[in-house]
Amino acid sequence: MNHYETVFILNPVLSEDQIKETVKKYEDLLVSKGAKMISKENWGLKKLAYPIQNKKSGFYHLFEYTVDGETVNELETEFKRDERFMRYLSVSLDKHAIAWAEKRRNRTKKSA
């Protein structure tokens, strides 16, 4: 079981309910494949550095989880098939990145 972080950008024309439904669907997909969710973050609507699909903003979300690599491939395949996703990036975290992510989570909790 490796430690992963996936950031994805959802289409800005989606309603709040559609966004929640989409995030829940993919969280459930990961959990059903044996993933242990460590953290989920909703970063909200952000301006993009450059237009993607003629859109200038998108809803950013982050999942941090542990799972085997094959499941990450399946997740990314599902992202490719779903038109609600504009971009995504999954990375495997090493011990230093895991420590940094934990600090970020703690800092976020304190400021909230």
Image (spheres, helix red, strand yellow):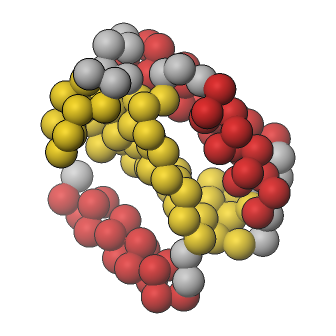
* Image quadrant where residue 74 sits: top right
Which residue is painted at 76% across and 63% down in the image?
Answer: 69
* Above or below for 35 versus 94: above
* Side of 3 relative to 54 (left or right): right
* Image quadrant where residue 37 sits: bottom right
* Image quadrant where residue 13 sits: top left
* Above or below for 71 versus 47: below
Do we see residue 40 in this rendering?
no
Q: Residue furthest bottom?
A: 96
Considering the image in quadrants, where does the N terminus appear?
bottom right
How many marks do you count on the picture? 0
* Above or below for 53 versus 89: above
Do we see residue 78 in this rendering?
yes
User: x, y percentage for residue 48?
Assistant: 21, 39
Which residue is painted at 65% across and 26% down in the image?
Answer: 81
User: x, y percentage for residue 50?
Assistant: 20, 40
* Side of 22 relative to 29 (left or right): left
* Side of 82 relative to 112 (left or right): right
User: x, y percentage for residue 42?
Assistant: 36, 41
Of residues 106 and 62, the one drawn nearer to the viewer in this rendering: 62
* Side of 90 relative to 42 (left or right): right
Which residue is painted at 26% across and 22% down in the image?
Answer: 54
Which residue is painted at 41% across and 72% down in the image?
Answer: 101
